[in-house]
Image (spheres, rainbow, N blue to C red):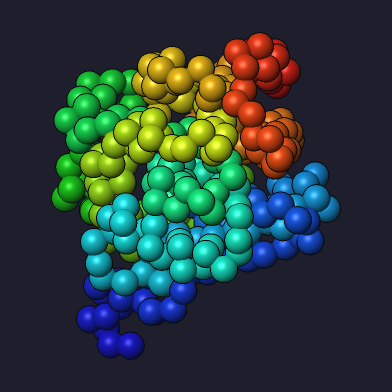
Amino acid sequence: MSWLDKWLGRTGDGGLHTEIRGQGVETLVFISGLGGTTRYWASRLQSIEDRYRIVLVDLLGFGESPKPWTRYSVGEHVVALHKVLQPLGPISLVGHSLGALLTVAYASKFPAQVHSITVIGMPNFGSTERAYRYFRHGPVRGGIVYTNVFLTMVACVITRRLLGRILPFVVRSVPREVAEDLVKHTWRSSTSSLWEVVYRYDAARDLQNLPPHIRVLLIHGGQDLMAPLDLIEELTNSNPRWRLCVMPGVDHHPFLRDPKGCLAMIDRLVKDSSNADRQPDSPRLVEAFRRDEPS
């Protein structure tokens, strides 16, 4: 590989990096957010490994997956995911942040393959203008960096080139292995994915149009600054069949803060979705689910 290829971020042309564990009948697929990798989930799945076939995937442009010089659009990500997920048969998807948005997009594109989806910390801006307004004038410190392509690119390069080795000592809000992997991308894959998926993709529209057989669970931190809760509540108020769990005092990483609690809810959702009758949730069942949520 030439120095130009490396500089442009052209690294590999194979399929997405995938790890499979467990021998269960039901298949659970975990998709990380921006900068996340399989290690975001890997060490926190022991409680369900004996009951599910677990699939961990690095998104295109992140972790150990290829990082081509391309437009990292929703369609590009979904096509790459489908190449590795299609042979697995029926699946339930779990996505965090950007991965949550792509979970919705995948279920919308291939509904016949999907039993249920769990979206954790999903940003629900609906438009670039709404996202810009929130990050520039909202509570996120330094939010202007997230809405300027040049500044985002520079921040990405500095983080990867200068701070990479010391990042685990600087970023203490996530486990060490998660912080270490925050540099496993290119400025192109990170910046393009942020704009194309988080800012320009309207997941609410696809979510509303999912067929009734796909059960939906939304897990959100009550103190999530990167994905404001009020926009998720606004979205879920329109569909009483969806299950919303708000974890008080939790930030953008509910799964890292309470993995056992999140997995218990996911397990319950998948069991419901595997019932032969696939009956819609009644308001009473949804309310009972909410009472059982971890505090």
Position above or below: 222 against 269 = above
- Residue ID at (72%, 62%): 21
Left/right placement of residue 228 relative to residue 22 reads left
Q: Can you name the residue that lies furthest to the bottom here?
A: 1
The image shows residue 32 at horizontal and vertical percentages of: 51, 50
Q: Is residue 293 visible?
A: yes
Position above or below: 11 against 21 = below
Position above or below: 44 against 290 = below
Position above or below: 7 against 162 = below
Q: Is residue 169 visible?
A: no
The part of the image, by quadrant, that contains residue 62 is bottom left
The image shows residue 136 at horizontal and vertical percentages of: 21, 27
Left/right placement of residue 249 relative to residue 230 reads right
- Residue ID at (52%, 64%): 86
**Depth check: 145 or 65 in front?**
65
Quarter of the N terminus within the rendering: bottom left
- Residue ID at (22%, 33%): 127
**Depth check: 251 or 170 in front?**
251
Quarter of the C terminus within the rendering: top right
The image shows residue 99 at horizontal and vertical percentages of: 45, 47
The image shows residue 17 at horizontal and vertical percentages of: 52, 69
